[in-house]
Amino acid sequence: MQDTSFVIPLWADLTAVAIGGVQGAVYAAQFRDRRLDLLGVAIIGIASGLGGGLVRDIFLGRLPVALTDNWYVPAAVVAALLGMLLERVFTRLATVITVLDALTIGLFCAIGTSKALVLGLPAIPAIFLGTISAVGGTIVRDLLLSVPIAFMHVGSLYAVAAGVGATTLVILHAVGVPIFLAAIICVAVTFGLRVLAVFFNWTVPEQRRLERIPRLPRLRRTRPESR
Amino acid sequence: MQDTSFVIPLWADLTAVAIGGVQGAVYAAQFRDRRLDLLGVAIIGIASGLGGGLVRDIFLGRLPVALTDNWYVPAAVVAALLGMLLERVFTRLATVITVLDALTIGLFCAIGTSKALVLGLPAIPAIFLGTISAVGGTIVRDLLLSVPIAFMHVGSLYAVAAGVGATTLVILHAVGVPIFLAAIICVAVTFGLRVLAVFFNWTVPEQRRLERIPRLPRLRRTRPESR
Amino acid sequence: MQDTSFVIPLWADLTAVAIGGVQGAVYAAQFRDRRLDLLGVAIIGIASGLGGGLVRDIFLGRLPVALTDNWYVPAAVVAALLGMLLERVFTRLATVITVLDALTIGLFCAIGTSKALVLGLPAIPAIFLGTISAVGGTIVRDLLLSVPIAFMHVGSLYAVAAGVGATTLVILHAVGVPIFLAAIICVAVTFGLRVLAVFFNWTVPEQRRLERIPRLPRLRRTRPESR
């Protein structure tokens, strides 16, 4: 039998939540045409910081961890208000934010994947759940802000990084690596991929480019309205 | 006592999921102004194929079936990527898609309604849950694509077909028809209504048309800005 | 030990649901460019009337109350259809609607907060859940209507009123006030704040106004594009 309990320390979990909250506020501030009040910023902080964990636990049919402790909501709210006040600073520290954000994705991914494995979910659902945990916060954030879901569009390797990290964790766990060590490697892989993706501007192939492959010249002529 | 266990065979469930995935990809491809990458298409496939079942099980407070088995996520993803590659073919086979889609709605509706009945929910919540199961995938898909929710707008008899099908299942179950037979009739009713609605272009009365009924000429004059 | 059971009478719960349904229909009717059919109006009624309770119970990992009884869905649907037919009347009675609406927020807030306390959640998660219960219906409504989430934008003290009401309930409960009495005071506080906020046009400070505080004149010149 292997070690199946992976308990993240509360301070680490809260740090991830707070970084998510800061990021949400800085992200929301860029929409100059949308007037968010203090409450709106606090809500975006909660969505960005707690969204991933809430989605994870709702999918698992469990009481969300954020509802079992007094520290989660304040951590996200205070971080978001700080993010708003110091937006100008954070915008200049874009590199720092990218690095911290990649670390957060990695942490949420590792927590989600290992929680799924500990609860007995099969490999692929565990990867799915880990990925959802990593990107859930940005989905909830974008839904509440009524902006296009960031990770649906070209240029975002958020979910790919999380998916590869979660897959790594599941494989390592299957071959007998202790889950705590597997989780740390998962954080490292997700973090590394995400940071490299941002710095090297990697993208996933687009839908339209692929569609073009089977398009023959003859077919083009049947669509004169495309001119 | 009647037979209350309604277990859909895995292959049938996965077929419904795959058709949902194909549909999601073909639907997403029509938005030429939105650039979805391969990942986006996979996500829309998951949303369209698994969304209804996820929403159903989350409403029921149960671990989603799609998270208990390794086949669901890959079925939706592979179907969506196929749907993207063969989009041109599927677009020409619109009739085939409509028919398959109606079958999927019927299947999801029957599974959702009978699962609710088996879990002891009353009649009207069972109908509600069956309908949500049938349309949940399209709601999640449209939310992620940031497009207006399809079934909220005139011309879509999606939910009506599912609602009538679910009601039929609940009534048949109440009068003693075995749930498996009732479920098959539910699929047939939902399927038939949906296909007929598409071919005969049925719609539900609009909000504005109804509003006009109680409007008296005298009232019109009090609103000169309507000219 | 204190009295921890707070059971709202069914008629009161259904009244709150029905007022929510009416409000949803009247709200949806103002979007003249969006053509909702009868079904769409019924769905908005369900979203507005049941959304808060559904979100609350899904967050708690419980079977939603609305799925345990035959009356909830019809109450929301019938109320929404009535709201659509009588939209003209309700629009003139804007004051009545505002008052009823504030009462509904207060009721949902009190039910959500006390349910959380009864289930053993800590203070801050209970306040969070009560607030979500109060505003959840409007979030689901706006997501389905594809309009900006109302409570995210300046001028809406919806969530603040609910948050203050929920906080009052939690404090009163902590100092030994029976939960039923604490819930009634919560309804009164939320109701009062919301009504006063509407009549006196209170708002929360905006994000941009705060940002301006640390902005020095020197920094302005570095952004010539703002002219």
Image (tube, coloured by chain):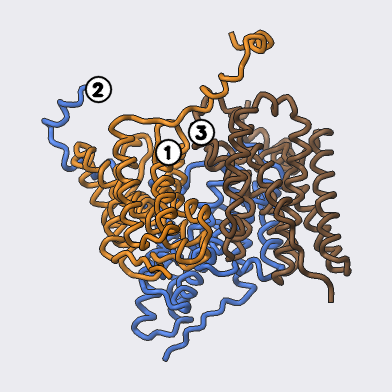
Chain colours: A blue, B orange, C brown
Q: Are marks 1 and 3 on the same chain?
A: no
Q: Which mark is residue B150?
A: 1
The picture places residue A149, in percent across and down from the top left corner, at 47, 46
Q: Secondary structure at mark 1?
A: helix
Q: Secondary structure at mark 3?
A: helix
Camera-side residue of A140 and A190 = A140
Inter-mark Cα distance, 3 to 2: 36 Å
Inter-mark Cα distance, 1 to 2: 26 Å
For image coordinates 39% across by 80% down, the residue present is: A173
**Position of residue B78 in the picture relative to residue C77 (left or right):** left
Q: Which mark is residue A177?
A: none
Q: Secondary structure at mark 2?
A: helix
Tag 2: amino acid: Glu
Residue under mark 2: which chain is it in?
A
* Residue furthest out toward the bottom: A1
The picture places residue B204, in percent across and down from the top left corner, at 44, 31
* Residue furthest out toward the front: B175
Tag 3: amino acid: Leu
Residue under mark 1: which chain is it in?
B
For image coordinates 72% across by 39% down, the residue present is: C156
Label 2, on which residue?
A: A225
Evaluate whether residue A18 shows in this view. yes
The mark closer to the camera, 1 or 2, is: 1
Res C143 → quadrant: top right
The picture places residue B226, in percent across and down from the top left corner, at 60, 12
Label 3, on which residue?
A: C38
